[in-house]
Image (cartoon, rainbow, N blue to C red):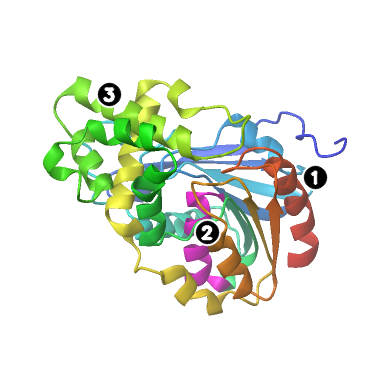
Amino acid sequence: MAGMDLYAPIEPTESGHLDVGDGHSVYWETVGSPDGTPLVWLHGGPGAPASAGTRRYFDPAQYRVVIVDQRGCGRSRPLASDHQADLTTNTTDHLIRDLEQLRIHLGIDQWIVAGVSWGVTLGLVYAERYPERVLGLVLAAVTSGRLRETRWITRDMGRVFPREWDRFVDLIPEADRAGDLSAAYARLLASPDESLRTEAALRWCEWEDNHVSLAPDHTPQLIHENPTWQQVFARLVTHYFAHGCFLADNEVLANLHRITHLPATLIHGRHDVSGPLDTAWQLHKAWPTSHLVVVNDAGHFTGTMLEELLKALNAIKGRAT
């Protein structure tokens, strides 16, 4: 690999669907060396699964990378896009149990945990519950699942993007606009009216595209995804946000002492208005073994953040093993 370019395209060495119970089948794949250091990649969203390009983040000579599509999205089944899909068995606890079940299924004793955005919160909670299974962490676009982070995304950022926020809330019944906007959107996305569900998913994706970066060269992405992808993503995000990410508020920071002995790199964009830098800073201050990288040209996993992620993924192996 020259510089910090992505590694060459690669196909999985193994792949499959794991029956994790509750009627869910979770897709997984491994890439790289079967004898490499195990690493699990946790995608964002919830509901924004990894793509084939994600495989190119990792040195295939050094790592055995496990990529998993979390419940309800990607190649896992059933998809959350069905408005009748039962989401009661799609919670943070369920995702944590799925990861442990997959680790055991693949015969892995310990692994490095890496992820982006929502995958950061999921990775932190997993590590705090199973610290003996984690060698180290690489976390980009840092989140922690706090209610203040959700309120910031759904309501407070209307001060930064007032025109776009008005369009975001315009679809919500007027009586619901003073309440939990995530829950209001979750109800729209569960409507039997297909056209309403499609429009709600598009509006949610438009809002997310607006607020992920203040950088002048930011390019929207979610509005270009197909309607099924948008509905999966919007349903799962609103489901998790409406339930406080199924965590006690401030749970990640309260339990951080369980993993402060582990090496970690936290990567965050200076222009990330979706998730202001204070969350990453608070974690870093409470985590003596962590290294914080602030990327001055990046928003929420934009700009040169990917380059910093590749550097961190290359470096963590030496710190964690």
Image coordinates of residue 156 in percent, x first then y, are 37, 50
What secondary structure is marked by label 1? loop
Where residue 170 sits, quadrant-wise, is top left
Q: Earlier in the sequence, mark 2 or mark 1?
A: 1
Question: Is 316 placed above or below 195 here?
Answer: below
Residue range corresponding to the magenta coloring: 116-131
State the SS at label 2. Answer: helix
Rendered-image quadrant of the N terminus: top right
Q: Nearer the viewer, residue 263 or 132?
A: 263
Q: Report which residue position mark 3 lands on.
A: 198
Q: Which amino acid lies under the numbered mark 1 shown in the image of this protein?
A: Ala
Q: Which residue is mark 2?
A: 123
Q: Of marks 3 and 2, which one's residue comes earlier in the chain? A: 2
Q: Closer to us: mark 2 or mark 1?
A: 2
Main SS category, magenta section: helix
Q: Amino acid at mark 3?
A: Thr
Do the numbered discs 2 and 1 sit on residues whose CB atoms are within 8 Å?
no
- Cα–Cα gap, marks 3 and 2: 31 Å
